[in-house]
Amino acid sequence: MNLKEKAKLLPEKAGVYLMKDAMDHVIYVGKSKNLRQRVKQYFQSMKSQSPKVERMMGVVKDFQYIVTDTELEALVLECRLIKEIKPFYNRLMKNDQGYAYIHISIEDEFPRLSIVYNPADQGLYFGPFAKSSMAEKILELIHKYFQIRRCSSQRIPKGGGCLNYQLHNCLGACIESCDHKAYREEIDKAVSFLEGRDQSLLIFLQEKMAAAAAQLEYHKAAIYRDELALAKMLNQRQKAIKTIEKQRDLLAVELLNGKQAKLFYIRNYKLWLKRRILLEGKSKEVLLEELKEFIFLQLNEENTEKQKRLKREALDEAQILYHYLQGKRKNLFSMKLPKHPFSQKASRKLEEDLEKLVEKLYHQIGCIEE
């Protein structure tokens, strides 16, 4: 049986597929909500494929697949397999060295910004960014709108300072007459922007774009539009990371149909445990007790990991979980779990939240049955 025919026999379910070469090495890992539909596309006319896919399919000699109950499981499994196997054609997630950080040497008298790949302890770091090009664009945006040095730490006692100072692009950290307080204020503004706290640059770019468009300066307006989109992207990204860092432990329940559901226990940004449960003929009270038992069993384990700051190794999976749970999915419900669940107050709050979740769950089951 050739691979095209084999692909037609795949189940129309969520899962992960692994492309293999003649040596039986996995050269690509992918995921899909519908395995049959996705994998069949690889064996269509090469004219419709990208050059990368065309090259890959030239060496693919077999494939295997893993079926999952939900799209979330497929997304997480794909992420973990790519990190474990490091397939040749999964270049974007091949290793962690591709992650870039924006570094501010905050301990210096006149701090500067740079892009680094191996964070140390000193200074402030923003990221990680999966693509260094994204970090470079953000750094360029900051240098354009904040008066921060680009030059090295060398000081010029006499003369007109570096070219950027002469072009009024920085406050002149390279000359001895530079106002230290004013420079620090610029650094603080840049930090606030990178943290997503300061919206003033977004407002400024919005106004400049509108003004340029009103003057029929469409090229200028397009530049401001692209810069605004970049600033908004950074702002949303920081909000996502902050939310992830706050919501370390979550319970999610996804309806598979009106008779079954999948429980997901998320601990320290990772999908820690999953379990399929039956709903048919089960009362709300029985399900509530089952969920409580499931949660307390996990929270009571002695091997609970210490809560740490979000690391670059965890970012991919953490963002997968965040975006999946934030998506508008009618059959998915989630709730935050308390840090200290065994206090009387936290235990009462947990039970109240579980009752609300069960009510939503059964309401949606009613909608499905209708």
Image (tube, rainbow, N blue to C red):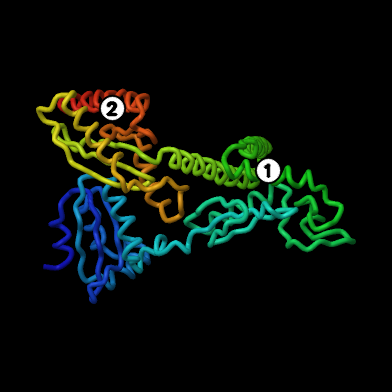
Q: Secondary structure at mark 1?
A: helix
Query: For residue 188, which numbered disc appears in the image?
Result: 1
Q: Quadrant of residue 91?
A: bottom left
Residue closer to the observer: 79 or 345: 345
Asked if residue 129 lies left or right of residue 273, the reply is right
Asked if residue 118 lies left or right of residue 73, the reply is right
Mark 1: amino acid:
Asp
Where is the C terminus found, in terms of image quarters?
top left
On the image, numbered disc 2 is attached to which residue?
354
- Above or below for 184 versus 153: above
Q: Secondary structure at mark 2?
A: helix
Which callout, 2 or 1, points to the residue nearer the camera?
2
Q: How would you rate the neighbour count of disc 2 (Cα within 10 Å): few for under 14, some for 14-19, many for 20 or more?
A: many
Where is the N terminus found, in terms of image quarters?
bottom left
Q: Position of residue 253 (x, y in %)?
A: 26, 36
Q: Position of residue 125 (x, y in %)?
A: 57, 52
- Single out the residue that lies furthest toward the bottom: 23
Q: Label 2 vs label 1: CA separation?
A: 42 Å
Tally the numbered discs.
2
Q: Position of residue 3 (x, y in %)?
A: 17, 66
Residue closer to the observer: 52 or 309: 309
**Residue drawn at point x = 71 percent, y = 58 percent:** 150
Mark 2: amino acid:
Leu
